Image (cartoon, grey):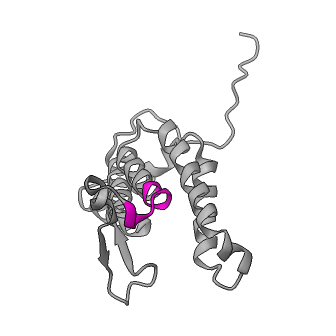
Amino acid sequence: MLMVGTIIGFILGKIRGGKLRNLKFLHIRLWPLLILSLLMQVVLIFSDKVPLLIKYSTYVYSFSLILAVIALVVNIDKKGFWAILIGVILNLILIFIDPAKLPAFLSVLNFRIVIPKYYILSDELGIGDMFVSLGMLLFIHGEMLRSRFGQRPTTMIKFQYKGKQ
């Protein structure tokens, strides 16, 4: 569902006059943790033939979500990251608590929507996934519409040394 929120964010951003080039000014702290988290989840999607990954898939998925939470908390000032954080935490709660034993006030967390078969990535959508999609939509849309007057594009390496002045 991350893809759906991202695509809708791009579309809404363009419709509202946003610029794709604004995305080159992004600065996300601890971005390698987010990339590692996503890579771990992608590996799990295609790991149905590897017995070791199948056996430990819940642990790998939980660890990937914990990495994402760390990076999201550090970047909570970014528009939409609060929604992504809520979604990831809701998904973590469902992993650590058996859905059959959820207290009544938390039973809404196990709410799922069945997705038609032509959507290839998943057949179910949980409430946490909805928050993650909403957060990505808000983030991409907000970044595309942000005014970038006077800012320079982000670089991976920043030189702090100015020399003698």
The residue stretch that appears in magenta: 92-101
Q: Residue at x 35, y 72 (%)?
A: 125
> Where on the picture, by quarter, is residue 99?
bottom left
Most frequent secondary structure within the magenta stretch: helix
In this view, the residue farthest toward the right is 164
Eyeballing the image, is 139 above or below 53?
above
Report the label total.
0
x and y percent of residue 141 in the render?
33, 53
Q: Is residue 93 magenta?
A: yes
Q: Horizontally, is 84 left or right of 57 in the view?
A: left
Residue at 62% over, 42% down: 155
Residue at (69%, 39%) from the top-left corner?
157
Q: Quadrant of the C terminus?
A: top right
Task: Give 94 or 29, whichever is nearer the viewer.
Answer: 94
Location of the N terminus by quadrant is bottom left
- Give the residue at the far bottom of this rendering: 117
Is residue 6 covered in magenta? no
Instruction: Please tell me which residue is depicted at 43% across the width and 60% down the height of the picture.
Output: 94
Q: Nearer the viewer, residue 77 or 131?
A: 131
**Apparent side of residue 92 relative to residue 133 in the rendered image (left or right):** right
Side (left or right) of 5 relative to 44: left
- Looking at the picture, how far across and down is residue 19, in whole percent? 36, 54
72 left or right of 48 in image: left
In this orientation, which residue lies closer to the viewer: 45 or 146?
45
Where is residue 160? Give x, y as percent: 69, 25
As displayed, is residue 163 above or below residue 23?
A: above
